[in-house]
Image (spheres, rainbow, N blue to C red):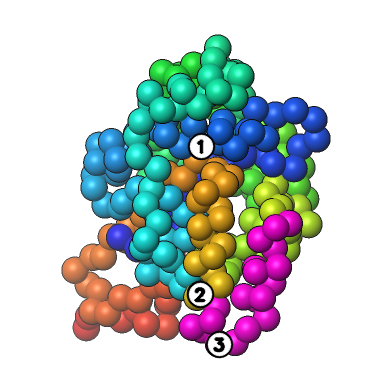
Amino acid sequence: ALLAGVYAVLFRMNVEGDQPWKDIRVRQALNYAVNKQQIVDVLMGGTTQPSGQPVPRRSLGYDPAIEPYPYDPAKAKALLKEAGYEKGFSFTAEGVTGLAMADVAAFQQIAVDLNAVGVTMRVQPITYQQLLRNAVTGEWKGDATMTSYTSEPTLDGLRVFRTHSCSNRATIICDREIQPVIEQAQATIDLAERERLLKQVMKRYHDQAYSIFLYDTSTMFGVGPRIAKFGALGSRLMWNEIELKP
């Protein structure tokens, strides 16, 4: 299993007008509401781990000191009540089905967990082509999108923020306060300094809870008995490294 991204429910932070998750307490509440460990253990077969930040383990910028939000539905309800959503609310999340491991079952379980704290999530299936088009144009139709923060193929956490920050004109997440740090990381060629800066960004995204962080994506490859040498970078096959037995 190769881990090159973090699966998440990304809130459309750039939508004008009132949205429940414009309140940080709501965003944090939804993170507490989802039992990520159960999804990993039961639906993913224990092949990955829950996450609380935008980059997966082994990526440059990953901060092991940042813990995933624990499963705490009581705290989720308390935060929703504080924010004025004691009776909950409904939203629609766009997502591609059949693309990632057990994604349909994961969508269903997330919806069940959110429903337990009074929040209704409706899943609007879209094609992968629609997902890519939306990412480029910003023409999202739903209130949120179920997708991954991805650092592949380089496993440099900076790649995540070329898409999910103010650096991308079509982004749904733009945090002006942390953007200067992202730009500093983009400008430096010193890997140690880039890592230091990226860890600041990881903490900011975790604390602000711009998405429901779920788990590191797990990409599985099946290798047959004729394969003598296998190579991959993230989910991309390295064809020049693959060799067959005589």
Let me know if residue 187 is in the magenta part: yes
Name the kind of residue labelled 2 in the image. Arg
Residues at marks 3 and 2, CA–CA distance in whole angstroms? 10 Å
Residue 40, label in figure: none
Q: Residue furthest front?
A: 82
Viewer-closest of 42 and 209 = 209
Q: Is residue 208 visible?
A: yes
In which quadrant of the rendered image does the C terminus lie?
bottom left
Q: Residue furthest left?
A: 225
Name the kind of residue labelled 1 in the image. Gln
Packing grade of label 3 (10 A; few <14, some 14-19, many >=20) is few
Left/right of residue 57 with respect to residue 154 in the rendered view: left
Secondary element at image label 3: loop
Residues at marks 3 and 1, CA–CA distance in whole angstroms? 33 Å
Packing grade of label 2 (10 A; few <14, some 14-19, many >=20) is some
Q: Earlier in the sequence, mark 3 or mark 1?
A: 1
**Residue 50, percent from left and from top:** 35, 48
Residue 245 vertical placement versus 215 (above, below): below
**Residue 232, percent from left and from top:** 39, 72
Q: Earlier in the sequence, mark 2 or mark 1?
A: 1
Viewer-closest of 186 and 70 = 70
Q: Residue at x 57, y 46 (%)?
A: 208
Q: Residue at x 56, y 62 (%)?
A: 201
Which residue in the structure is indicated by mark 1?
28
Residue 196, label in figure: 2
User: In this rendering, which labeled residue sits more in front, label 3 or label 2?
Assistant: 2
Give the magenta part as a residue range.
176-194
Q: Residue at x 55, y 23 (%)?
A: 82
**Residue 161, percent from left and from top:** 62, 63
Which residue in the structure is indicated by mark 3?
190
